[in-house]
Every structure is written in C-alpha cells, then in structure tokens.
Image (spheres, helix red, strand yellow):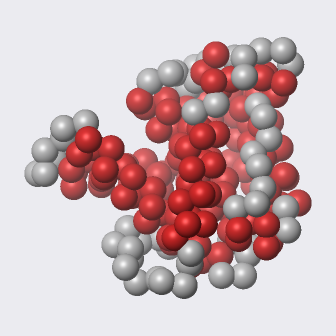
Amino acid sequence: MLWPFNRFRNPTVPRGTIEAIYGMIVAQAREPAFYASLGVRDTVNGRFDMLILHLWLVLRRLQAVEGGNSMSQALFDHFCADMDGNLREMGVGDLTVPKRMQAFGEAFYGRSAAYDLAFEAGDEELAQALSKNVFNGEAADGARVLAAYVRETSDSLTKSADEAVRKGAWAFPRPAAASQGGAS
C-alpha cells in the first residue's frame, strides 16, 4: 500500500528519475489525441482522470521491478506533492487543501482498484471501468479504444527491461486514434 506521508523516508530512489518518470506520465496524460479523438473531457477532471490512469499503469509495472516498491512510493509521493502544489497555486486555502487531497487519494485508490479488477477480467470489463471513471458512463466507443490503448501500454511497459523501467528509459505508445491520422 502506498502511503502519502512517506516523502522523507526513502532517500535511495533518485529524485531526478522520479521527476522524469512523473513528467513522462503528465506529458502523456496531456496527449491531445485523448481529448480530440477519443472524447475524454478536456477539463480539469478529465485531465486528472488521464493522469491517474497513466500513473496506475506505471505503478502496476513497477510491482515487478526490483526496488519497485520504493520507486512506487516515491512516485506516488511526487504525485501527491504535485496535486498539493497545484491546489495551492489555484488559490485553494490551507484549510481546504487536506480535504481535497483526501478526495484525490480516494479517487486514486478507487480507480486503481477498479482498473486492477477490470484489467484481469477482460477487455469489455476494462472498457466499462474506463467508461465509468473517465467518460462518466458515456462514450462506449471511446472507452473501448482507450481500453485497447491501456492494454497496448501495459504490454509495452511489460516488454521494457526492468532497468529501463527503473531509469525511466521507455516511452508510452501513441494513442491509436492519433496514429490513424488524427491529432497529435
């Protein structure tokens, strides 16, 4: 289990590597094809959903890497620090930030559990989980394409050598809709 308050406990994970991996996750979550071609809502909530999805994919892969628990914790801590910083930058008051952070944590854990179960259950179940969590129960076609992308991304990460995963020396695949002549 990842704990949001272990930020200072693990100096063995290179901070630069975690920042690079998190930067890759954020960049991929902002890929225009998700919003223009697949119909993910281009809103704060839609982008947050895509960030959680990509973070989940990377954390899932890190489970099989030696030292992956430490890296997972450091990556999750970085996510929490980023969310905290974004809230403060948007002017959310000090008394409200902890409540929002709790909501972010609940969203992350709830979606992660749903994605884990759906991923193991099959493609249609994964598409349904994505439809519910990313598309608010709508856009079944977009959810199916996104589910195929999730499978492709998981396969790509699985094929990446552990050392490459540890160093952040891998890349996310482009969403299918983007590579079929859509937006990039």
The quadrant of the image that shows the C terminus is top right
In the picture shown, does residue 105 fall above or below 161? above
Q: Nearer the viewer, residue 44 or 167?
A: 167
Q: Nearer the viewer, residue 7 or 20?
A: 20
Horizontal side of 105 relative to 90 (left or right) equals right
Name the residue: 31% across, 50% down.
Answer: 85
- x and y percent of residue 3 in the render? 41, 72
Name the residue: 48% across, 83% down.
Answer: 11
- x and y percent of residue 27 in the render? 60, 40
Horizontal side of 15 relative to 156 (left or right) equals left
Tell me, yes or no, if residue 182 can be seen here.
Answer: yes
- x and y percent of residue 95 in the render? 11, 51
In the picture shown, does residue 159 fall above or below 35? below
Horizontal side of 175 relative to 136 (left or right) equals right
**Would you identify the image quadrant in which residue 112 lies?**
bottom right
Q: Nearer the viewer, residue 132 or 15?
A: 15
**Would you identify the image quadrant in which residue 134 lies?**
top right
**Would you identify the image quadrant in which residue 158 lies?**
bottom right
Name the residue: 57% across, 50% down.
Answer: 23
- x and y percent of residue 131 in the render? 61, 30
